[in-house]
Image (cartoon, rainbow, N blue to C red):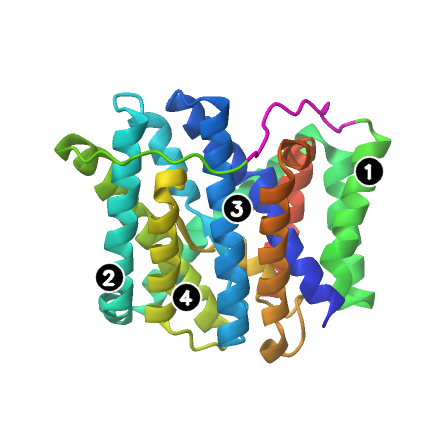
């Protein structure tokens, strides 16, 4: 066990809930879901992420960080309005089954091996760049918070390297509290459990939702996720990881999960040297991240609202220094 690895995994989940989670909630609003359906959607994503992260990290002994498809959720905000939720669920199911087939057969790994490394690195940089840009903007709206996080991080890198990100998070939360910047807690969502929706398959939904969701998830999440693992010296089994995660996503689609996949942005926080100096021991971050997802999925709206109470500036800068730490 390593405290820094546990913290890295928890932080990867926290950032997913404090930032990208808001995109998922906006997608549920675009679909006109009831509170129970919305709760089921979040439950399915949380449980899927948690189970896959724990089981695959234990089995492979590498830090498998699982996340929901944030680009997919952003895509759904614009595309769900003209379809019933049952049609959307049918599209979620088809997209996840297609990803599972491509993953288990090895086609995805084969295609990925044909893409030049610099292209994949550029794709990864394109995904991470917005976090860095957003962090820079935070200095204008919340200079004390952003400054305390960055200063603490670089001091930590000098004197207590493995805990620099944790110290930056604590400093950021302390300054957020000192400046009275926490948002008011207004829990309006209760994760009571799953609500089953019978999938309906229509050509329009498959073309407008399933196809773009499949492409976006594979290209902007699973591909960079595998690239990240390779960049840290791991040799991940793409068939096992992509196939298993996509199959779990398909099983949870009738409960609202639009798509779970390998983490791309949040994985960078947990698989680097800040997690643990020895890369063979960083799989603990995958376990702690998975447990965090299960905890949030079980406890409900109060805890989710707690994540949302953290200002975006704090989340953005902590995410940026965590990602920076993984690259140094």
Label 1 crowd (10 A; few <14 / some 14-19 / many >=20): many
Q: Is residue 98 left or right of residue 241?
A: left
The residue sitting at 23% across, 69% down in the picture is 105
> To which residue does mark 1 refer?
175
Q: CA distance from mark 4 to mark 1?
A: 35 Å
Residue 125 x, y percent position in the rendering:
44, 55
Name the residue: 26% across, 64% down.
108
Label 2 or label 1, whichever lies nearer to me, is 2
User: Which residue is at the front of the view, 180 or 82?
Assistant: 82
Q: Which residues are magenta?
A: 181-192
Q: Position of residue 149 (x, y in %)?
A: 75, 46
Residue 23 is inside the magenta segment: no
- Name the residue at 51% across, 57% down: 51
Kindly indicate whether the residue at mark 1 contacts the one at mark 2 (C-beta within 8 angstroms).
no
Give the SS element for disc 1.
helix
Q: Earlier in the sequence, mark 4 or mark 1?
A: 1
Quadrant of the drawing holding the C terminus: bottom right
Judge left or right: residue 120 versus residue 129.
left
The secondary structure type at the circle numbered 3 is helix
Residue 227: which numbered mark, if any? 4
């Amino acid at each position: 066990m390593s405290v820094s690895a546990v913290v890295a995994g928890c932080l990867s989940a926290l950032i997913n809930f404090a930032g990208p989670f808001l995109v998922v909630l906006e997608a549920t609003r675009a679909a006109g879901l009831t509170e129970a359906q919305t709760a089921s959607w979040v439950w399915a994503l949380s449980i899927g992420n948690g189970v896959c992260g724990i089981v695959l990290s234990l089995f492979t002994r590498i830090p498998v960080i699982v996340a929901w498809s944030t680009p997919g959720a952003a895509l759904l905000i614009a595309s769900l309005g003209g379809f019933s939720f049952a049609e959307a669920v049918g599209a979620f199911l088809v997209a996840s089954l297609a990803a599972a087939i491509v993953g288990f057969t090895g086609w995805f790994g084969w295609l990925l091996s044909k893409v030049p490394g610099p292209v994949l690195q550029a794709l990864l940089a394109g995904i991470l760049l917005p976090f860095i840009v957003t962090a820079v903007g935070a200095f204008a709206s919340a200079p004390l918070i952003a400054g305390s996080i960055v200063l603490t991080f670089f001091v930590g890198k000098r004197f207590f390297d493995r805990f620099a990100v944790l110290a930056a998070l604590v400093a950021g939360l302390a300054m957020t509290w000192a400046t009275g910047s926490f948002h008011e807690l207004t829990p309006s969502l209760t994760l009571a459990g799953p609500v089953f929706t019978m999938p309906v398959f229509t050509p329009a939904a498959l073309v407008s939702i399933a196809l773009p969701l499949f492409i976006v998830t594979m290209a902007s999440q699973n591909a960079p996720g595998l690239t990240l693992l390779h960049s840290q010296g791991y040799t991940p089994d793409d068939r096992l990881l992509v196939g298993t995660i996509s199959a779990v996503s398909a099983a949870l689609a009738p409960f609202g999960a639009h798509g779970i996949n390998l983490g791309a942005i949040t994985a960078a926080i947990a698989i680097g040297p800040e997690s643990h100096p020895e890369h063979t021991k960083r799989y603990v971050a995958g376990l702690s991240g998975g447990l965090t997802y299960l905890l949030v999925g079980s406890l409900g709206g109060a805890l989710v609202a707690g994540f949302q109470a953290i200002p975006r500036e704090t989340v953005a800068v902590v995410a940026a220094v965590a990602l920076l730490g993984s690259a140094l």
